[in-house]
Image: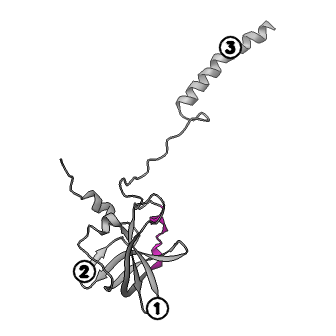
Amino acid sequence: MEGTRKQVIMKTPLFIGILVILSSAGTFAGTPQKAAPKKVYSGSGGWGPEGRYNRLFKEGLIQTFQGTVTRVGTFCPFDGMHDGVYLLLQTPREAVDIHLGPEWYVNHQDFRIQRGDHVTVTGARILFGDGSAIMATELIKGDEVLKLRGNDGEPVWIAWKKQLPIETP
């Protein structure tokens, strides 16, 4: 029996040493591994390129519409997001909901849209709520162009927000 006890005592330091080596290497089961850092767009109010709403954009579904604006308003795509600006566009075939972008961006552009304006809108059709809408990439009124997203859905306001002047007290 004493021989068996000696054998167990001799193996214990070896076992502890192996555990220390494995745990310090980060391979020991249960050791949390660090995930790759995600690109974070702070202050976008949920309107960033990786946000739930923007992921609805599909490149292959881009269409162009011409018509008359019958309504301009705000909407909140998902709980917790900042409000966005939408317009209802009456085309010869249908009334189309057009989602422009976040209110904090659209309302700071030198581009005004109002009821009765004749416009051309390009964007991707998305499934939204109980129907569909157009997530606009570009809005044209006369000779004015409001660029909202790239054809890949990347919002232009991400770069715009970085260029805002810093207010100092």
Residue at image mark 1: 93
Amino acid carrying label 3: it is Met
Q: Nearer the viewer, mark 3 or mark 2?
A: 2
Amino acid carrying label 1: it is Arg
Quadrant of residue 47 within the rendered picture: bottom left
Q: Nearer the viewer, mark 1 or mark 2?
A: 1
Q: Mark 1 and mark 3: span between their CA atoms?
A: 86 Å
Q: Residues within 10 Å of mark 3 (few under 14, many from 20)?
A: few
| Marks 1 and 3, the one that precedes in the sequence | 3
The question of residue 99 being in magenta is answered with no
Q: Nearer the viewer, mark 1 or mark 3?
A: 1
Image quarter in which the N terminus is found:
top right
Residue at image mark 3: 10
| Marks 1 and 2, the one that precedes in the sequence | 1
Among all residues in the image, which is located at the extreme top?
Answer: 2
Which dot marks residue 139?
none
Q: Residues within 10 Å of mark 2 (few under 14, many from 20)?
A: few
Q: Mark 3 and mark 2: span between their CA atoms?
A: 83 Å
Q: Are marks 3 and 2 in contact (CB under 8 Å)?
A: no
Where are the magenta residues, as a range? 52-62
On screen, residue 36 versus residue 30, left or right, reads left
Q: Position of residue 140 (x, y in %)?
A: 30, 81
Residue at image mark 2: 144
Q: Residues within 10 Å of mark 1 (few under 14, many from 20)?
A: few
Q: Position of residue 141 (x, y in %)?
A: 28, 83
Among all residues in the image, which is located at the extreme bottom?
Answer: 92
| Marks 3 and 2, the one that precedes in the sequence | 3
Q: Position of residue 110 (x, y in %)?
A: 23, 72
Out of 61 and 20, give the one closest to the viewer: 61
Out of 32 and 48, give the one closest to the viewer: 48
